[in-house]
Amino acid sequence: MKLLVTGGAGFIGSHVVRRLVNNYPKYEIYNLDALTYAGNLENLRDIESASNYSFIKGDINDMDFINSLFTKYKFDGVIHLAAESHVDRSITDPLAFVRTNIIGTVNLLNAAKIIWKDNFDGKRFYHVSTDEVYGSLGQTGLFTESTSYDPNSPYSASKASSDHFVRAYGETYGLPYVITNCSNNYGPHHFPEKLIPLFINNIIQEKPLPVYGDGNYTRDWLFVEDHARAIDLVFHKGKNAETYNIGGFNEWKNIDLVKLLCKIMDAKLGRNNGQSEALITYVKDRPGHDLRYAIDASKINKELGWKPSVTFEEGLEKTIVWFLKNKEWLDNVTSGTYQTYYQNQYK
Ligand code: NAD
Ligand code: DAU
């Protein structure tokens, strides 16, 4: 099995690559990543010299490069995670999301179709997507695989579009595919532009904690290693041309989650209870902010036996301990362009 993983130097991708490298010694695993601000080879130091692993620096938007790569390596499978992934950045620069998330995905689909020459035996294109394609829930209900697409941000619109292209390549050309739509991940190596790592970093530095709007927005949180395990399972056992929702059965209002984080961090840092909560600052809301996401993950549970293995308490503990132990990683990713991003986003 020659397996291409795209975006393997990012947050989720690095957990997927590590899992595959450790679990499948006979595979050849190629990690293709452009190393944008979100890509970081530090995330993979522990497995970088494994004999079944290779890193390739490259951009999925470069069609000629992608075609030559597929011609050279003749991959049997693709697990596609490379993307622009942050909603706030999509609001300031939507075209970057159109390029990577839509055009980049179609470049990969096309290259796979050409190299597989319509003989699709043993081949699989796995597209990693998000629950945000379904739009926003009200106070009740869950997203199922048959919920209509209703994306609200440039990020979710670009991911929805890429999902449609994957499905269209399946319907039109018979390209074998699977798609998963997952809820919010958290864990080690999470880039500190997203809620949990940004707030952990700000608590460490005693900086304001910028809660958007009234903080009554709800997300369904899943520990990243449970997502990586689901991806491994769906890649190997998922049915062709199916989509699977993946979620944590773990809904939290942002403000409640932030208060919990503050409490745990105060205890870890030897601060007075309430010290970090005093940093909470309500700021201007995100435009088009989706009220609530929550996944019905019963299909992947019933068909493939997957369910989260880590409770939220365990996952948060592992995450916070990791960030406190890896100050150098955090310092490195928050220097340079991060500072400019932060000033512009939270000025
Ligand atoms: P991330 O931003 O941490 O990582 C993205 C990776 O893709 C980076 O390593 C980056 O360098 C690479 N990349 C970006 N543009 C590229 C390009 N043009 N060519 C090659 N590589 C490029 O993202 P993440 O949070 O790990 O998300 C990974 C995937 O999972 C995305 O497709 C995202 O939509 C999806 N997803 C994320 C979550 C979440 O909570 N983070 C939940 C569900 C689905
Ligand atoms: O649901 C899956 C999606 O989860 C993934 O597809 C995306 O790639 C990932 O970024 C994430 O999107 P969200 O927009 O839900 O995540 P984020 O961490 O940016 O925000 C989580 C919630 O916290 C959301 O309601 C906005 C709020 N928030 C976020 C930030 C960064 C704040 O209140 N303040 C902040 O500074």
Image (cartoon, helix red, strand yellow):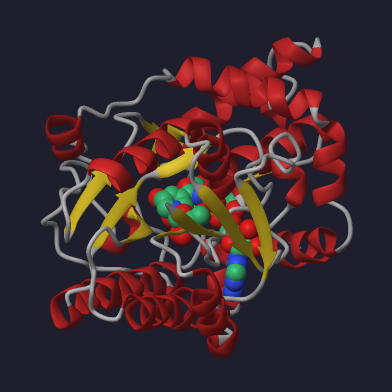
Horizontal side of 81 relative to 163 (left or right) equals right
Question: Residue 16, relative to residue 4: is it above or below?
Answer: above
Q: Residue 162 location, x and y as percent?
A: 35, 73
Task: State which quadrant residue 36 falls in.
Answer: bottom right
Is residue 212 something that shows in the picture?
no
Q: Residue 9 location, x and y as percent?
A: 65, 53
Q: Residue 265 location, x and y as percent?
A: 70, 20
Residue that appears at 39% across and 67% down: 156
Residue that appears at 60% across and 83% down: 65
Considering the image in quadrants, where does the C terminus appear?
bottom right
Q: Residue furthest bottom?
A: 64
Horizontal side of 130 relative to 101 (left or right) equals left
Question: Residue 122, relative to residue 252: is it above or below?
Answer: below
Horizontal side of 323 relative to 135 (left or right) equals right
Q: Quadrant of ligand 1?
A: bottom right
Task: State which quadrant residue 339 falls in.
Answer: bottom right
Q: How many numbered dots are placed on residues in this image?
A: 0
